[in-house]
C-alpha cells in the first residue's frame, strides 16, 4: 500500500514536471500583445564587431520609432544555408524579418520561405530606379519583389600592393588594366625559393572561393552563366571556358599543389596574404577596407576596376550583399516592413547603416552615397558600384550552381578535367537540378 | 485459482507502473528516434525541399543516386577512410595501451597525457591540425624537411588529404587505449608467470595470452570504430570549410549527405543516401560479426 502511494506520488511529480516543461516552451508565443509597443525579431548573420555596429543601427531605429522595437538575433548563415531559419519557417514560428544573402533571394522565394513585398513597395511609393539596377534585379523573381537591398557590395575592387610593385621595379601607380598585363606583372612579382613560393602575383581562383572567381573572371571575359528567358544554364559558354583556361594557366605554371599549399592556412583575417604582401594582386571586398585599417594599417595599396582581357568587358563587376526580407508567416509584417523600409530606403536609415556599418546602401539616392563620394577607398568602390551590370544568376538552384562551379574549377585547376569538360559537367548537373526545382512548383 | 488471479493482477499493475515509469523514455524514443527514422524512409521516396510538402517520386532518388558520380566518389572516400583509419587506430591504441601498462614511475601522468587529446573538442583539435598540416611552414612538414624527407602538400594535394585525416584520427584514439588498458589489467598475472616458466617468449606471451584476453575489447572497438568511420563528418567538414576538397578527395559520404540536405535542401535525396549508408553499415557489421566473432574469447566461455 505504502509503496504504491509513493509510486503514485512520483508519477504525479513526473507528470507535473513535464507539463511545466511544456508550459515553459509555449509561453514565448503570446508576448508582444500587451503594451502599445510591438516587438519584432530580426535574424541577422553578423558576429564580431559588425554585430555591435548593427546593434547601433537598431538603436537608431528604435529611437526613431515609438511604437516598434526591434530585437536582433544572431543566426549563423553561411550564405546559402540557414538551417535555423528554414526550420523556423517550416515550424511556422519564423522571425518577423530576416537577412538573406542577395543571390539566395530567388531560391528562398521559390522555396516559399519569404513573402513578396509588392503591395508594401507600392504603398511606400518605391521605384526600381531608386536602386542600383543589379540590386533590384537580384531581388525580383517571377514578376515579384521579394527582398530589399540592405547593403550593396560591388564585387570586386581590384587591389594591388604598391610596395611590392616598387620592389619589383613596376610603376606603383600603374595597376594592370588587362589580363595580359596581370600575367606580365605576375612574372615579375612571383618569387620561388627552393621550390617554395615566397610571393606570388595573383592566384586567379582564390577570389572568395572558386565559384566567385569563376563569375568574376567569367564576366570579364564576356562569358555568361544563365539565360533567364529560356531558363538555361550556360556555364560552358565559350567565353567562360576561356576565363577558366586563364585561371588554369596559373595552376600549370606554378604547380597547383604548391600554390594551394602556399594559400592554405591563411584562415584568419589578419593572415590575409594580401595584407602581408605575399600576394600582390587580389580582388577586394568592401568590408576589407575596415579589416585593413584594423589588421594592416601600414599596407600601401591601391584600388581600381577589374582588369579585362583584350576584347573583354571593361570594368566588369557584379553586385553582392545582404538583403532584408519578410518570412512567410511573419507575425508582424507591417512593422517588419517599416524596418525594411527604414534600413533600405529611408534617407536617415540608409545613412545610419552606411555610417555605422561602413556598408554601401543599395538606395542610390541615399545621402550616404554623397558622403562617401570623396572618401578614399569607398569612392573607388562607389565608382565600381555605379558601373555594376551583373548579379549572380537569379534562379532557385543558385547555391547548387555555386557548389557545382566550385567543383568544376577545382577539377580543372588540378588537371583532372579539361576546362571545357568541367564546365560542361557543371552545366549539365545544374540544369538537371534547376529543372527539378522548376518542375516541383 | 484465486492465487493465480491475484498474482496476475499484481503483475498487471507492475507492468502498468513499469510502463508508466518508462513512459518518458518510451515517448522520447518514439518521437525523437522512431518517428524520424520512419519519416526518413518515407521522404527517401519523395522530392522534399523542406518548406514544401513532400511529393512522392517512387524510386527516383535511388535511381539518380546510382547514376551520381559524386555518390560513388564519396562512398569510395569513406571506404578508404574506414578501411585504413579503423585498423590503424586499433593498432596504435593497442600498442599505446601495452606501453602504458608497464610499471614505470609517473605512469598516471603518461596515461593522462595520451588520453587528453580525445577530450579536446573536435573542432578545436581540427583547427590545431590545420596548422600542423600546413604544407608551408606547418610543424609536420618543417620536421620532415629537416630530416630531408619529402614534404607532401597534405590538405592541398588530393593524394595526401585522406592520409592527413587518417593521421589526425590517430591522435584521438585515447578512448580506445583506455578500454584496452582496462582489459590489460584483467589479464591474470599467473598466466604470464606460467608461460614464462614454460619458456614462452614475450611475443608468444602476447599472441597467446594478451591478445586472446583482449579480443572482446578489440572486437568492440573494431565494430564501433568501423561504424564511426562510416559516419566520418566533422573533421572533414571543418578542415575543408564544408567543401570536401581538393577535387572531392575528402568529400565523405556523410559530408555529401549533409550538403544535399542542408545546403541544397534536397531532403529526399539525402534521406535516400542515409538509408543506403544504414544498409551498408548493417551488412558490413553483420559480416564482421560472422567472420570475426570466432576469434573473440570471453572469460566465462568453455
Image (spheres, coloured by chain):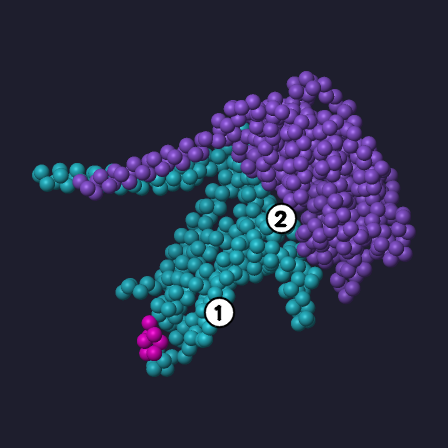
Chain colours: A purple, B cyan
The one nearer the camera, B117 or B238, is B117
Quadrant assignment, res B153: bottom right
B11 with respect to A200 (left or right): left
The one nearer the camera, B107 or B60, is B107
Residue pictured at 48% horizontal, 69% vertical: B109
**Numbered disc total:** 2
Q: Is residue B189 magenta?
A: yes
Instruction: Give residue A62's position: percent from left, percent from top.
Output: 64, 29
Instruction: Indicate the chain on which mark 1 is placed.
Output: B
Q: Tell me the SS state at disc 1.
A: helix
Q: CA distance from mark 2 to mark 1?
A: 34 Å
Mark 1, other Cα within 10 Å: few <14 / some 14–19 / many ≥20 = some
Give above or below for A275 relative to A351: below
Give the residue number, with chain letter if any, for mark 1: B110
Q: Tell me the SS state at disc 2.
A: loop
Residue pictured at 72% horizontal, 33% vertical: A352
A272 with respect to B189 (left or right): right
Mark 2, other Cα within 10 Å: few <14 / some 14–19 / many ≥20 = few
For the N terminus of chain A, the image quarter is: top left
Instruction: Give residue A275's position: percent from left, percent from top.
Output: 76, 52
A185 with respect to B264 (left or right): right
Instruction: Indicate the chain on which mark 2 is placed.
Output: B
Per the rendered image, the range of residues in magenta is: B188-194
Instruction: Give residue B250's position: percent from left, percent from top.
Output: 60, 52
Give the residue number, with chain letter if any, for mark 2: B241
Q: Earlier in the sequence, mark 2 or mark 1?
A: 1
**Whether residue B134 is visible:** yes
For the C terminus of chain A, the image quarter is: top right
Residue pictured at 72% horizontal, 37% vertical: A356
Q: Is residue A434 magenta?
A: no
Residue pictured at 65% horizontal, 40% vertical: A52
To the question of a shared chain for discs 2 and 1, the answer is: yes
Amino acid at each position: 500500500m505504502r509503496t504504491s502511494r509513493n509510486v503514485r506520488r512520483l508519477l504525479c511529480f513526473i507528470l507535473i514536471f513535464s507539463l511545466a516543461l511544456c508550459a515553459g516552451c509555449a509561453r514565448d508565443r503570446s508576448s508582444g500583445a500587451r503594451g502599445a509597443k510591438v516587438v519584432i525579431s530580426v535574424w541577422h548573420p553578423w558576429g564580431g564587431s559588425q554585430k555591435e555596429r548593427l546593434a547601433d543601427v537598431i538603436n537608431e531605429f528604435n529611437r526613431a520609432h515609438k511604437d516598434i522595437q526591434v530585437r536582433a538575433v544572431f543566426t549563423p548563415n553561411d550564405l546559402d544555408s540557414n538551417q535555423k531559419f528554414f526550420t523556423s519557417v517550416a515550424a511556422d514560428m519564423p522571425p518577423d524579418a530576416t537577412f538573406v544573402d542577395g543571390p539566395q533571394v530567388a531560391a528562398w522565394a521559390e522555396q516559399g520561405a519569404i513573402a513578396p513585398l509588392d503591395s508594401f513597395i507600392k504603398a511606400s511609393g518605391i521605384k526600381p530606379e531608386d536602386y542600383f539596377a543589379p540590386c533590384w534585379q537580384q531581388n525580383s523573381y517571377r514578376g515579384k519583389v521579394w527582398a530589399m537591398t540592405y547593403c550593396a557590395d560591388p564585387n570586386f575592387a581590384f587591389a594591388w600592393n604598391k610596395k611590392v610593385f616598387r620592389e619589383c621595379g613596376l610603376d606603383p601607380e600603374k595597376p594592370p588594366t588587362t589580363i595580359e598585363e596581370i600575367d606580365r606583372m605576375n612574372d615579375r612579382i612571383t618569387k620561388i625559393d627552393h621550390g617554395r613560393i615566397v610571393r606570388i602575383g595573383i592566384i586567379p581562383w582564390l577570389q572568395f572561393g572558386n565559384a566567385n572567381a569563376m563569375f568574376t573572371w567569367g564576366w570579364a571575359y564576356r562569358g555568361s552563366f544563365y539565360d533567364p528567358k529560356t531558363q538555361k544554364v550556360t556555364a560552358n559558354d565559350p567565353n567562360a571556358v576561356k576565363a577558366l583556361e586563364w585561371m588554369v594557366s596559373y595552376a600549370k605554371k606554378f604547380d597547383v599543389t604548391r600554390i594551394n599549399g602556399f594559400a592554405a592556412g591563411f584562415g584568419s583575417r589578419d593572415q590575409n596574404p594580401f595584407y602581408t604582401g605575399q600576394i600582390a594582386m587580389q580582388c577586394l571586398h568592401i568590408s576589407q577596407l575596415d579589416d585593413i585599417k584594423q589588421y594592416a594599417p601600414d599596407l600601401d595599396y591601391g584600388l581600381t576596376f577589374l582588369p579585362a582581357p583584350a576584347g573583354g568587358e571593361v570594368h566588369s563587376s557584379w553586385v553582392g550583399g545582404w538583403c532584408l526580407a519578410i518570412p512567410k508567416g511573419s507575425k508582424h509584417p507591417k512593422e517588419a516592413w517599416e524596418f525594411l523600409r527604414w534600413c533600405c530606403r529611408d534617407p536617415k536609415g540608409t545613412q545610419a547603416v552606411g555610417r555605422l556599418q561602413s556598408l554601401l546602401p543599395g538606395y542610390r539616392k541615399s545621402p550616404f552615397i554623397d558622403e562617401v563620394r570623396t572618401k578614399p577607398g569607398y569612392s573607388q568602390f562607389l565608382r565600381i558600384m555605379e558601373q555594376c551590370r551583373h548579379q549572380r544568376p537569379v534562379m532557385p538552384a543558385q547555391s547548387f550552381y555555386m557548389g557545382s562551379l566550385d567543383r568544376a574549377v577545382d577539377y580543372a585547376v588540378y588537371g583532372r578535367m579539361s576546362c571545357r569538360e568541367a564546365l560542361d559537367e557543371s552545366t549539365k548537373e545544374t540544369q538537371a537540378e534547376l529543372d527539378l526545382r522548376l518542375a516541383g512548383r | 485459482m484465486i492465487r493465480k488471479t491475484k498474482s496476475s493482477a499484481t503483475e498487471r499493475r507492475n507492468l502498468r507502473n513499469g510502463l508508466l515509469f518508462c513512459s518518458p523514455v518510451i515517448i522520447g524514443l518514439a518521437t525523437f528516434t522512431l518517428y524520424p527514422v520512419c519519416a526518413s524512409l518515407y521522404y527517401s521516396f519523395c522530392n522534399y525541399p523542406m518548406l514544401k510538402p513532400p511529393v512522392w517520386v517512387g524510386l527516383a532518388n535511388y535511381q539518380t543516386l546510382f547514376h551520381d558520380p559524386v555518390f560513388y566518389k564519396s562512398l569510395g572516400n569513406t571506404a578508404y577512410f574506414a578501411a585504413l583509419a579503423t585498423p590503424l587506430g586499433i593498432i596504435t591504441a593497442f600498442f599505446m595501451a601495452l606501453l602504458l601498462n608497464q610499471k614505470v614511475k609517473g605512469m598516471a601522468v603518461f596515461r593522462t597525457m595520451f588520453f587528453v587529446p580525445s577530450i579536446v573538442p573536435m573542432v578545436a583539435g581540427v583547427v590545431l591540425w590545420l596548422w600542423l598540416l600546413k604544407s608551408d611552414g606547418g610543424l609536420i612538414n618543417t620536421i620532415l624537411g629537416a630530416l630531408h624527407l619529402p614534404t607532401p602538400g597534405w590538405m592541398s594535394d588530393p593524394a595526401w588529404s585522406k592520409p592527413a585525416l587518417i593521421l589526425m584520427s590517430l591522435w584521438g584514439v585515447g578512448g580506445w587505449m583506455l578500454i584496452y588498458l582496462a582489459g590489460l589489467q584483467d589479464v591474470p598475472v599467473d598466466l604470464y608467470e606460467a608461460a614464462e616458466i614454460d619458456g614462452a617468449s614475450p611475443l608468444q606471451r602476447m599472441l597467446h595470452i594478451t591478445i586472446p584476453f583482449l579480443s572482446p575489447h578489440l572486437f568492440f572497438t573494431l565494430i564501433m570504430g568501423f561504424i564511426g568511420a562510416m559516419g566520418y563528418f566533422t573533421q572533414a567538414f571543418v578542415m575543408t570549410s564544408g567543401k570536401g576538397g581538393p577535387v572531392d578527395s575528402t568529400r565523405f559520404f556523410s559530408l555529401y549527405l549533409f550538403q544535399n540536405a542542408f545546403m541544397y535542401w534536397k531532403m529526399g535525396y539525402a534521406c535516400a543516401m542515409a538509408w543506403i549508408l544504414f544498409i551498408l553499415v548493417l551488412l558490413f557489421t553483420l559480416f564482421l560479426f560472422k567472420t570475426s566473432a570466432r576469434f573473440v574469447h570471453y572469460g566465462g566461455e568453455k
